[in-house]
Amino acid sequence: MAFDNSKKYEAFDKKIWLASPTMHGEEIEYVKEAYETNWMSTVGENINEVERITCEKIGCKYSVALSAGTAALHMAMKLAGLKLYGQPDVGHGTLEGKRVFASDMTFDATVNPIVYEGGIPVFIDTEYDTWNMDPVALEKAFEIYPEVKLVVMAHLYGTPGKVEELKAICDKHGAIIIEDAAESLGATYKGAQTGTFGKYNCISFNGNKIITGSAGGMLLTDSLEAANKVRKWSTQARENATWYQHEELGYNYRMSNVIAGVIRGQYPHLEEHIAQKKAIYERYKEGLKGLPVSMNPYDEKNSEPNFWLSCLIIDEEAMCKQVRGEKDVCYVKEQGKSCPTEILEAIASINAEGRPIWKPMHMQPVYRMNGFITKEGNGRARTNAYIAGSAEDVGIDIFNRGLCLPSDNKMTEEQQDKIIEVIRACFE
């Protein structure tokens, strides 16, 4: 059924987006500089500056500007294959046929690069405290697959996971971490920026991120050798010769100097954007008080998110009946109860954009036959059917009861108040 807008909530004239780019003016000046100096390709001062600023902001020694966060993750997987499985006599290695542990609740860009390099993702269930990888489930995964030497860890919606616990487990088992900080630029754990905890780390400048270049990503590392390898691989693996000489597989992954100009103009506004996003989160938290819902959680003692997306989760007893198929969904309205589908329809009815929580990777058809580990051990493959009260699959529970709220930092307080009012109406 559809949301009953019987109160005739008037729609916004201009759509309120989930998270759209916020531009300030400096960006176009750096883009013009690239145009006027004719540095329009994959070299130029904007790229040099963005790499320098990234290292300065995050606290890593080296960064390599690439075409997308996914490209950065792919290069990280290639580096990991070389480090973990490279043969000294030939100087290369891959993840071919090797299992790799990965966050289950994430966007598939976190996981796909594992497969690009021939690896086999094994998904680690989520925990409720931060909606990130569960350390207990990770330890259980090493008991089941002790040969695994690589863990890919994401920070969902800009909220740091339990980094210290996860890192200690990986160190204990001799595994290295690739940190997917695509959503968490500017977030900190115990005072350190996300993007500094793994052997190889990645951030994204996609159009919806906390700062943007419309596209682009960055490989972060403290290894000069690793940075130089990525610079080479990402420019078609050209050898140092006067002609085009290629001795290994390369990629066209380098960032454009034009896109770097946009990012260069965005960087001074990172902290401003984070403050705006935090204010949105706090207004939702205050405005939704008294409803059977809670906001996406974080460890207030040890971490400071960048609050990229504000999300809510409905209390289990306040969920009306909701059933999802592979591509469709239906629900039955119950007095005093609601569900993500109804709330998303309500938000859409006033011309605002929300989204479901990322569907866990182990539920995706493309990965449904892959391993999935909960804190109890081997999980079972799931369809979209939700089993109420199931304690062994946290990710599917959050997916079924949670949603992402409009979090655009250009949204006014009055607009957000109206969105809150419409959400409250769903529980009447």
Image (cartoon, grey):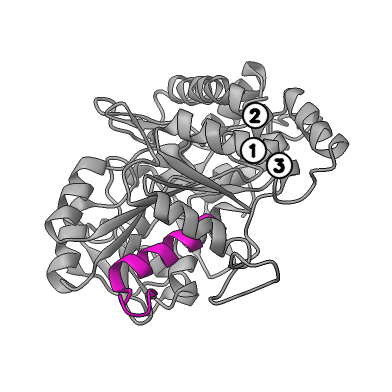
Residue numbers of the magenta segment: 71-92
Q: Is residue 405 above or below residue 412?
A: below
Q: Nearer the viewer, mark 2 or mark 3?
A: 3
The Cα–Cα distance between marks 1 and 2, rounded to whole angstroms, is 7 Å
Q: Does the CB distance between marks 2 and 3 fall below 8 Å?
A: no
- Which is nearer the eye, 147 or 365? 147
Disc 3 residue crowd, few under 14, some 14–19, many 20+, Cα 10 Å: some
Residue at the spot of label 2: 266
Q: Is residue 141 above or below residue 316?
A: below
Which residue is located at x 15 percent, y 63 percent?
Answer: 140
Q: Amino acid at mark 3?
A: Gly
Residue 164 location, quadrant:
top left
Q: Amino acid at mark 1?
A: Thr
Residue at the spot of label 3: 44
Q: Does the CB distance between marks 1 and 2 fall below 8 Å?
A: yes
Q: Amino acid at mark 2?
A: Gln
Residue 220 image offset from top left, x and y in percent: 44, 46
- Which is nearer the eye, 285 or 72? 72
Residue at the spot of label 1: 212
In reply to whether residue 53 is colored magenta, the answer given is no
Disc 2 residue crowd, few under 14, some 14–19, many 20+, Cα 10 Å: many
The Cα–Cα distance between marks 1 and 3, rounded to whole angstroms, is 18 Å
